[in-house]
Image: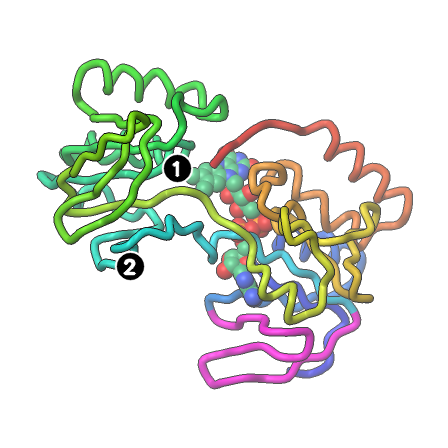
Amino acid sequence: MQHESVIIAGAGPIGLACAISAKRRGIDPVVIDAGATKLISTHDVETRFGREPISWDKLVLATGYFDSPNRLGVPGEDLPHVHHYFDEAHRSYGQDVVVIGGKNSAVEAALQLFRAGARTTIVYRGKTWPKSVKYWLRPDLENRIKAGEIQARLASQVIEITPREVVVRGWLGNSERIPADRVYALIGFHPDLQLFERIGIAFDPESGRPEIDPDTLETSVPGVFVAGSVTAGDKISEIFIENGRFDGEKIFGTPAERVQAKDKYQGIRRETGE
Ligand SMILES: Cc1cc2nc3c(=O)[nH]c(=O)nc-3n(C[C@H](O)[C@H](O)[C@H](O)COP(=O)(O)OP(=O)(O)OC[C@H]3O[C@@H](n4cnc5c(N)ncnc54)[C@H](O)[C@@H]3O)c2cc1C
């Protein structure tokens, strides 16, 4: 790859918003995405043809978190019928399906699976559904549970997954084997901290939050910036599309434009809890 003034890694909504911010200022950024070209370090990318060197004046990481799903860390998690991403509800018609998780992704998946004709059980470690469950999903879920159409196990911890069952431990210590032809473990995501390490970006190991200049979003590595959800580390619900889309203005804008972007960001806060 030839020398580029700006490379943006990540073509999610925030990477694209950053590209628009750059373009508005007469800069031609190159946007790469792991689907075809994955940033490995500050000086190379991986493509289907192998490693290629890169060089740049500004490198923006808008790499999000969807590539790194959280894991349960229990035996059987890597069995072929266990999925960390939700795909197509109709494949589960007539099957026993267990959804693990209690936030929006898990709740939405459980509702879709039920409607597609799956015998659905949702297992969540919390005692109640989190506040962040969207207001239109919560009553739907609660009513399906009341009607016995979806089974729910709250305050329950998955301890093992076998080819036919999910073994859970309830809050009284009792264990139960729930039949499962298919399992969706939808328990969130985290940013790729190994990428931060390879690049040398300083970050808080507890929260995964990179150390940044809050005005410009520049990291501890000069010329390397972060944008979008990756700026919030493990707090993946803190930055979403509606507030992260101003990050490009902070990276490419003038000091006055950065202040405007900050004000807009402050005005948009909500809990998504995906
Ligand atoms: C079910 C669900 C519903 C949601 N609903 C809403 C909503 O209504 N409103 C809202 O604002 N937000 C919503 N969100 C959150 C929103 O999807 C995220 O906040 C948003 O996608 C984050 O954008 P991003 O560009 O920072 O990262 P991402 O969307 O994760 O994009 C990052 C991109 O970077 C690529 N990438 C990763 N690593 C590399 C690498 N090393 N090199 C190159 N490319 C790389 C990835 O392949 C990906 O394409 C929802 C999320 C979920 C799961």
Where does residue 96 sit, x and y in percent of width and height? 13, 39
For residue 60, above or below residue 139: below
Please state the extent of the stretch shown in magenta in the rendering: 36-57
For residue 145, above or below residue 102: above
For residue 94, above or below residue 73: above
Going from N to C along the chain, the mark reached first, 1 or 2, is: 2
In the picture provided, is 71 more to the left or to the right than 145? right
Task: Report the residue marked by disc 2.
Answer: 78
Q: Give, as a three-letter code, the residue at label 2.
A: Asp
Residue under the image location 64 percent in, 74 percent down: 41
Question: Farthest left residue?
Answer: 94
For residue 197, above or below residue 272: below
SS class of the residue under badge 1? helix
Residue under the image location 29 percent in, 52 percent down: 83
235, 12: nearer the viewer: 235
Numbered label attached to residue 105: 1
Pick the quarter of the image with the N terminus: bottom right
Where does residue 158 sit, x and y in percent of width and height? 30, 41
Question: Callout 2: few (<14), some (14-19), or many (20+) C-alpha neighbours within 10 Å?
Answer: few
Q: Give, as a three-letter code, the residue at label 1.
A: Ser
Snapshot quadrant of residue 106: top left
Tag in front: 1 or 2: 2
Marks 1/2: CA distance? 20 Å
Mark 1 CB near ligand 1 (8 Å cut): yes
Snapshot quadrant of residue 220: bottom right
Residue under the image location 44 percent in, 50 percent down: 70
